[in-house]
Image (cartoon, rainbow, N blue to C red):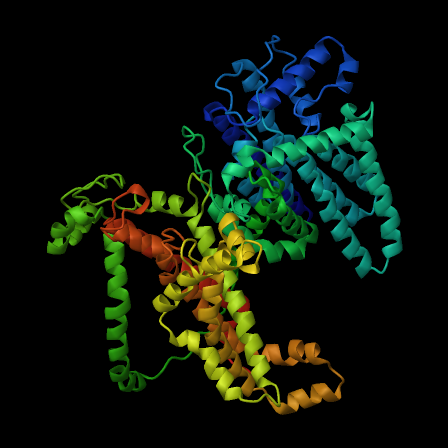
Amino acid sequence: MLMNKHLRTIFHVLAVALVIAVAFGLRTRAAEKLPIDYDEDDYLRAGQEFAHLIRTSDWRGFLDTNYRPEHPPLAKIAYGLAFLHLPERALVSDVAITDSPAQYLPPDQLHAARTEASIFGALTAGLVALVNPLGGLMLAIHSFTIKYTSQVMLDGLSALLSLGTVMAYVQYKKKQRTGWMITSAVLLGLTADSKFLHGTIGFAILLDWFFLAKNNKDVKRFFKSALFWGLLSIAVFFAANPFLWPNPIERLQVTLDAVRVTTTNSNVANAGYVAWQQLNWLTMSVPWPQNGAFIFLADTFIALLAVIGFGRLWKKERVFGIWILLEIFILLVWRTKWPQYILIVTAPLALAAGEGILTLWQPVVEWWKKRGSAVPARGPERSEERRALPWLIPGLVAFALLTLIPLVFQFAISLTDFNSSSLRDGLNGGIWRAVWEGLTGQARASGFDISARSNQVNFTGLNTFSPVFQYISGRADGWSILYFNVMWTVLTVLLQCGLGLGAALLLWQKGVRLGKFWQALFILPWAIPELIGAQMWLNIFHGDWGWLRLAAEKFGADSIFGFVSSALHASPSLWLLEFLLPAIWYGFPFMMLAASAGLKTIPQEALDAAAMDGANAWQTFRAIVWPLLTPLIIPALIVRGIFSFNQFYLFQTYYFQDATLATLSYNVFNPNSGYSNVSGGYFAVSAVINILTVVILMIFVTLFNRWSRAGEGVTYA
């Protein structure tokens, strides 16, 4: 037993070392290949100033030096220390924060600063690996984290210190030693001294600490300990920030004014990012050409694994789950949407992704353990199979004709470059010829080029899948079609379910008059074809001639119509309401019918028993109504989820061509669409999108069924 423990420790140490090596190797590669980015000239100049003060022993100069005061000086001082062994260079030019990044920086200082940032990033991955080696590996290969911890940014040191803050707190929880609490407070103060936004991790710790004290019924002690912890971290923050020493109040005001400028400047306003832009960044890999700086572009898969493993992470160590939720909330409300800010959450996200891998791997392990002990179930007798065969054949034939053959044909097209120029050849057998030649080795797979149009169908193999997936998961302008598709599905289904369930509960109440009439009225939106309904809503919201715009012109800009119209068309995010309202209106009747059918099956005796026990309406709904409704609601949610994921007419009517994979697939397929300045008629790309859609929906249905246990069906009848 002791030997096994020692072996596990050795393997864990080796895994941590391997993660650090991988992380450092990937970051040094990126440091060599990445072009100069925004802010690098600013922070390198700041490091130059501090290096000069140290060389000349001008310690009083620290009191008045903090180039770009919107950020504290600690990480800038660290860069200054990295320059001490180098010859002093002329200061980088002082330019406005809205200007383009510098075209030239001293190569030796740039290399030193980027190497230091890479070390901080590798150590952060190593700390994550101490908790979960798989999580450390996920952080090591995360492309956005690599980018901003291999450039002259402040996030490398900040992320390392914030993670150390949490890990020291976790040790305090386990061992209840004051030294760990003091360490956590000191690291928190230093984190805030590196970059303010990373210091918000302190709120996650306080929330977890409070919940723990509440469960232990020791809230008074929590307030005393938390007060000491907070005051100590604030003291460390001021002690390690010499810029604040001469006049803390005045200098803090200077910092706040600088923060206001950086969050309201023209670059921020002109970017026009949506409120959920940071979630776009979190679910895509670096989308810009980076001279081959990244070997792995797996951020989308890491985000998916994090969603799968979040529950497992929450059970193991709640503070990491709170960290993720709190920082995502801060990212959503923070005005500046630059991608480097997501590094406040990538460490716990990587931990959740590591748990996601274990979650997916656990069923395989369980199957392997039970493979020899499982008793094979007795199958049907041969005579029974013969009697059932005539009834099964028609269904199997229909399934093959309507599902399998079209899917195989789509997959075959996706292995080629089939397009409008090669339509004649493709319809004359060119598709199967190209696939056969490719699979048998008679033809090599050609590369993917959407602008190339051959008159003959050629075999491309899987070369089309990677660029198409990279495009749908994240474009250079920061838009992620895949994320918006998933977000749209979740939002619409939840809102449709809420409204449909609410309507069903209202009609279920005793004494409701004209219940059948109201139910028929609520069903009407579902009876209207989606295309007609989309046209109707377009007539309401169109910015030039919609009814809302006409009402605003008639009643004035100060009227409610003017306010709503201007808000919808001026905000980079509120335009989503133009689509949510029609989607809810169209989809809630289905959920209402499913809920109404479920409510009729609830035994009256169960409700009477709850009333006799003194349960109020909410308690009755939570303990009786909802559990009995779930077996019918969950399948309805899956159906609505599939329809919402494939939403087409609504977005196509509004000419929102890249809203969902369905609209993108159609506009790439349509020879007359001219999508995104590229002529349509690229049937192979459309087929790839369709195959990816099927795979994504299969994963969604499988995971949702497993989470909701929908396969158990109705268990109360």
Q: Is residue 489 visible?
A: no
* Vertical placement of residue 480 versus 265, above or below: below
Q: Quadrant of residue 129?
A: top right
Rendered residue at 24%/83% (across/down): 390
Q: Position of residue 72 (x, y in %)?
A: 71, 29
Left or right of 641? Residue 64 is right
Q: Position of residue 93 (x, y in %)?
A: 57, 15
- How many marks overall? 0
Q: Quadrant location of the C terminus?
A: bottom right
Give the x, y percent position of residue 481.
42, 50
Q: Nearer the viewer, residue 118 or 4?
A: 118
User: In the visual, does 47 lie left or right of 208?
Assistant: left
Q: Nearer the viewer, residue 376 or 710?
A: 710
- In terms of depth relative to the viewer, which is nearer, 3 or 326? 326
Give 637 or 386, whichever is nearer the viewer.
637
Report the side of 604 relative to 547 (left or right).
right
Question: Which residue is found at the position 60% from the left and 22% from the top?
Answer: 42
Q: Residue at x 64, y 46 (%)?
A: 330
List x then y, in percent, for residue 527: 39, 76
Q: Can residue 301 be seen?
A: yes
